[in-house]
Image (tube, rainbow, N blue to C red):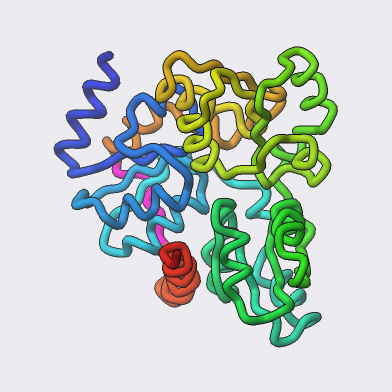
Amino acid sequence: MEIIDKINKLKQERNAVILVHNYQRPEVQDIADYIGDSLGLSIAASKTDAKVIVFCGVDFMAETAAIISPDKTVLLPEVNAGCPMAEMIDVEKLKKLKSEHPGVPVVCYVNSSAAVKAESDICCTSANAVKVVKSLPNNEVIFIPDKFLGQYVQSQLPQKKLFLFDGYCPTHAKILPEHIARAQEAYPGVPVLVHPECRPETIAAADAALSTEGMMKFVKESPAREFLIGTETGIIYRMEKENPGKRFRPVTELAVCPNMKLTTQAGVLWSLEELETIVTVPKEIADRARVTIEKMIAIGRQD
C-alpha cells in the first residue's frame, strides 16, 4: 500500500487526477480517479478542476486530453506507450489519400496523432463512428486509419461509399473466427461481444460489436451471467469489479496490447514526483485538431 499512499499524497499536492484506460493493468486501474475509453477520459479531463492530468493510456490519448484541456498539464507516465495503428498513418499519407479523392471529407478515428486529426474534417470513436459518418451530407467519405472499423461502418451504412486507409489494430486483428468457435464450443449459449476494430469475419461470428464502453453497458444491463469478450483482455478486470456475480472470459488470451501494459504504479508515482513526461501539442496543430474533436462531440449530443 505504501506506493498507493505516496501516489495519493502527491495527487493532493499537485492537484492532479489519474485517468486510466480500460485496457490498463489491474494495478493501474486500482488507482484511477476516472476509468473509461480514450475520449470519455479526455472529456473527464476537460471537466475536472484539477491542474494536472496523469493519463494512463497511450500517446494519442494524452495528446487528445492536451488538445481539449490546453490550460492543464497532461502527463504520460510511460513515454514509450504508443499506438501501432495510429503510427500507420501520417500527414503525408493522408494528403495523398485526399489528393486521390478531392473534395471528399475525412473522418478520422480518434486513434490517431494530433497532426492527422488537424488534417481531417471530423473525428469519431468506435462508439459513434456510424453516427458521425451518417451525419455527413456527402455520399463519399474518406475513413482513416482503421480499415476494419471502416468496414464495419460501411456494413451499417450501405448508402455511403467509404474510402479506407490500410491501417488496423494488431491486437484486435489477432482475434479470429476460430477463437470464437472454440470459445462457443466450450461455453455454449454464452453471448460473444467483440470490438468493431476486429476483422469483419470475426464480427460476423459474434453476437454484437461494441466499443469498450458499449460492452460495459451491455454486460451491466444483460440478464446473462456469463460473457465471452473479444477485445483487449484488460477490460475484463473492470467488468468483474463492476459486475459481481457475473463471469467474463476472453475469446482469446492473445488479445493483449503490449503498449497498454507498459504503464505501472511505479511509473505513475515517478510521473507525479517529477511532473514528467509532459505532453504538448503545437498550438497551430492543436487548434485545428480541436475543431475536429469538438465537431464529433457535438454530433454525439444530437439524439
Would you place residue 292 above or below residue 170 in this image? Answer: below
Q: Residue at (26%, 55%) from the top-left corner?
A: 47
| Residue lying at the far bottom of the rendered structure | 103
Q: What segment is highlighted magenta in the picture?
A: 275-280
Q: Is residue 15 above or below residue 290?
A: above
Q: What residue occupies the far front of the structure in this picture?
A: 223
Visible residue check, residue 156: yes
Asked if residue 121 lies left or right of residue 27, the reply is right
Q: Name the residue nearer the viewer: 86 or 246.
A: 246
Res 86 quadrant in image: bottom right
Q: Is residue 99 left or right of residue 284?
A: right
Taking the image as shown, residue 81 lies to the left or right of residue 173, namely left
Q: If the image is split into quadrants, where does the N terminus sit?
A: top left
Picture quarter containing residue 184?
A: top right
The image shows residue 84 at horizontal and vertical percentages of 67, 47
Residue most toward the left?
13
Q: Quadrant of the C terminus?
A: bottom left
Q: x%, y% of residue 244?
A: 42, 16
Q: Residue at x 68, y 29 (%)?
A: 192
Residue at 16% in and 36% down? 12
Q: Does residue 262 appear in this view?
A: no
Q: Is residue 59 magenta?
A: no
The residue sitting at 70% across, 74% down in the picture is 141
Badge count: 0
